[in-house]
Image (cartoon, rainbow, N blue to C red):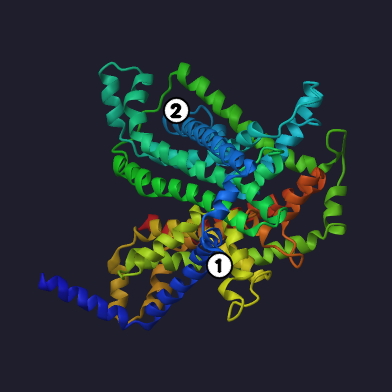
């Protein structure tokens, strides 16, 4: 016992003897407190404290609004349907890839494209496609089916678009879980005479059920926090995210919007806690380790043919929806004149300040992405490799942004930095500048990079770094010369992911952007709301090319300069 105490005391002395480490931790705590906890705390203050003092009057007023009560019901209905549908379609795709012998490489390629598209495209591209294909002037409805009064706006429009947007996320999550199931468990049931369907129901499904619940909750959180799709295709069907936005921009009711934001935040936080601290751990405990041997793939045509056809049709439909966007930018007038033209691309740059929009978006995202990637790796390093009292705080708060909807964060920043305690001092005047947009980009992308960094660092043996410490290197030197090169792939991946997420962000920044800055996603949203689909599609097409090019470049860099090949060779 005394030996443990001595060891702990020695670790403490080493920790306090490293000023760079102590300073880094202090700066991180300040950053996370000021830019994540403080805006959320301000929302709570606005909601509960008025000129009358501590009161629930703001909540009572907001809950008395029929449109707010309707928005809560609508949001939960869309969230549940989207979560269930996305998880089931994701499971279907994952099962076909892992268990079914695909006859051609074409399907594997289709799956990879479908899983990548939501990452590299703006969050509302499918809403544009849905309107252009199935709306009143849609190619499918008007020209193929001769239906002239079809409306895609409302509950079903939002649910379908969100399902098509989010099911690839579920597919990626469930594919890894299915690969880790030991084939011998299922083969034992087959040897006892059980049919494939019975094996799936009694063996495979119970093993993957926690992961399926995890996928449902992740999608549910994404759905109820989504702002862009309901704004474009929701019509008069209000959701919480759009109601909060309209409450602050239309009714100028900051206190009411803050109370609404707190309600939305409570829902997402509750779901996040269940997903993070219950289902995620249960899923990991159920499927620990890797499969003991290679799985015998299903070759029975009565199984492979219908499943392959169904997945292929769904995948092709999603890809066609994305392809619809560049065609929307090349037609003279969508729904009426289908002659090809480049006038919308010309207007983007000549009439609608396209160069400024792309420059502002690109520069701000380019500033935010390396900072995000480096911060993510530092937080990951501290969480995995170091032991100190504030470690739990840093990990929890850095992950908290994952559960905070963009509109909620945006209102928190408006209330916190346009007034609040930062009316004077070092952060005076940050509101309305590019700096606050960069900070929002960093905060929104931080959880993704941190999770990737933690996974990579847990695979590195401690002895590699300890030998550097023994030679007299300080923590900064060890991190920059030993740790960071070993997790170079994760760092580069986090950098590009942060760039893509920043340049395609809309929900938080739409409340914070000022006329001084033109951002691509805000422009797309504005023109889509006006029904100017040619301009909106032209902006979206160029944005997709930028993001896709970034991902391709990252893959090339990792392939040629990453650590994978060297590690494999070793």
Q: Quadrant of the C terminus?
A: bottom left
Q: Position of residue 55 (x, y in %)?
A: 51, 58
Q: Position of residue 43 (x, y in %)?
A: 54, 60
Residue 463 found in image quarter: bottom left
Query: Number of callouts in the render?
Result: 2
For label 2, the residue is 100
- Front residue (pair 235, 353): 235
Q: Position of residue 25 (x, y in %)?
A: 40, 74
Q: Is residue 50 left or right of residue 323?
A: left
Kindly state the secondary structure of the residue where label 2 is placed. Answer: loop
- Single out the mark in the foreground, 1 or 2: 1
Q: Is residue 127 left or right of residue 43?
A: right
Q: Is residue 366 visible?
A: no
For marks 1 and 2, the one nearer the N-term is: 2
Residue 478 found in image quarter: bottom left
Q: Quadrant of the N terminus?
A: bottom left
Q: For label 1, count other residues whose C-alpha is less than 10 Å away and answer few (under 14), some (14-19) or many (20+).
A: some
- What's the CA distance linking mark 1 and mark 2? 40 Å
- Front residue (pair 416, 135): 416
Kindly state the secondary structure of the residue where label 1 is placed. Answer: helix
For label 1, the residue is 370
């Amino acid at each position: 016992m005394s030996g443990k105490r001595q060891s702990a005391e020695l670790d403490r002395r080493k920790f306090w003897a490293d000023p760079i480490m102590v300073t880094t931790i202090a700066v991180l705590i300040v950053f996370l407190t000021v830019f994540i906890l403080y805006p959320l705390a301000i929302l709570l203050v606005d909601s509960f404290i008025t000129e009358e003092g501590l009161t629930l009057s703001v909540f009572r007023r907001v809950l008395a609004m029929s449109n707010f009560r309707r928005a809560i019901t609508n949001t939960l209905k869309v969230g549940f349907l989207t979560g269930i549908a996305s998880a089931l379609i994701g499971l279907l795709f994952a099962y076909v890839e892992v268990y079914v012998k695909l006859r051609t490489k074409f399907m594997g390629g289709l799956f990879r494209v479908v899983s990548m598209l939501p990452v590299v495209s703006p969050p509302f591209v499918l809403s544009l496609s849905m309107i252009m294909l199935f709306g009143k002037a849609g190619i499918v409805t008007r020209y193929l089916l001769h239906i002239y009064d079809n409306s895609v706006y409302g509950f079903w429009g939002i649910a379908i678009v969100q399902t098509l947007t989010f099911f690839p996320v579920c597919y990626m999550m469930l594919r890894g879980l299915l690969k880790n199931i030991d084939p011998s468990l299922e083969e034992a049931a087959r040897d006892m005479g059980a049919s494939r369907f019975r094996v799936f129901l009694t063996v495979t499904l119970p093993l993957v059920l926690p992961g399926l619940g995890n996928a449902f909750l992740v999608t549910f959180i994404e759905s109820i926090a989504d702002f862009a799709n309901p704004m474009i295709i929701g019509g008069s069907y209000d959701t919480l995210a759009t109601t909060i936005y309209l409450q602050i921009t239309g009714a100028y009711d900051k206190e009411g919007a803050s109370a609404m934001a707190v309600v939305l935040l409570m829902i997402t936080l509750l779901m996040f806690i269940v997903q993070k601290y219950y289902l995620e751990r249960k899923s990991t405990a159920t499927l620990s380790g890797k499969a003991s041997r290679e799985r015998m793939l299903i070759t029975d045509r009565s199984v492979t043919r219908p499943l392959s056809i169904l997945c292929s049709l769904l995948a092709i439909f999603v890809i066609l929806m994305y392809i619809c966007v560049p065609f929307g930018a090349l037609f003279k007038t969508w729904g009426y004149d289908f002659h090809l033209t480049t006038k919308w691309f010309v207007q983007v740059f000549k009439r609608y300040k396209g160069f400024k929009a792309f420059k502002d978006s690109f520069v701000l995202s380019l500033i935010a992405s390396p900072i995000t990637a480096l911060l993510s790796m530092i937080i990951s390093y501290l969480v995995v490799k170091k032991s100190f009292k504030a470690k739990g705080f840093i990990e929890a708060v850095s992950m908290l942004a994952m559960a905070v909807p963009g509109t909620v964060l945006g209102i928190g920043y408006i209330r916190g930095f346009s007034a609040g305690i930062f009316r004077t001092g070092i952060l005076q005047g940050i509101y309305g500048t590019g700096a606050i947009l960069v900070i929002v980009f960093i905060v929104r992308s931080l959880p993704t990079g941190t999770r990737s960094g933690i996974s990579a660092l847990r695979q590195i043996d401690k002895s590699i770094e300890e030998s550097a410490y023994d030679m007299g290197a300080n923590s900064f030197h060890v991190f920059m010369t030993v740790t960071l090169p070993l997790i170079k792939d994760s760092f580069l991946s986090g950098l590009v992911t942060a760039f893509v997420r920043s340049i395609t962000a809309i929900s938080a920044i739409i409340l914070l952007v000022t006329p001084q800055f033109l951002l691509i996603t805000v422009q797309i949203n504005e023109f889509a709301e006006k029904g100017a689909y040619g301009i909106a599609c032209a902006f979206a097409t160029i944005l997709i090319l930028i993001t896709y090019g970034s991902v391709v470049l990252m893959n090339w860099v990792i392939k040629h300069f990453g650590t994978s090949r060297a590690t494999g060779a070793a």
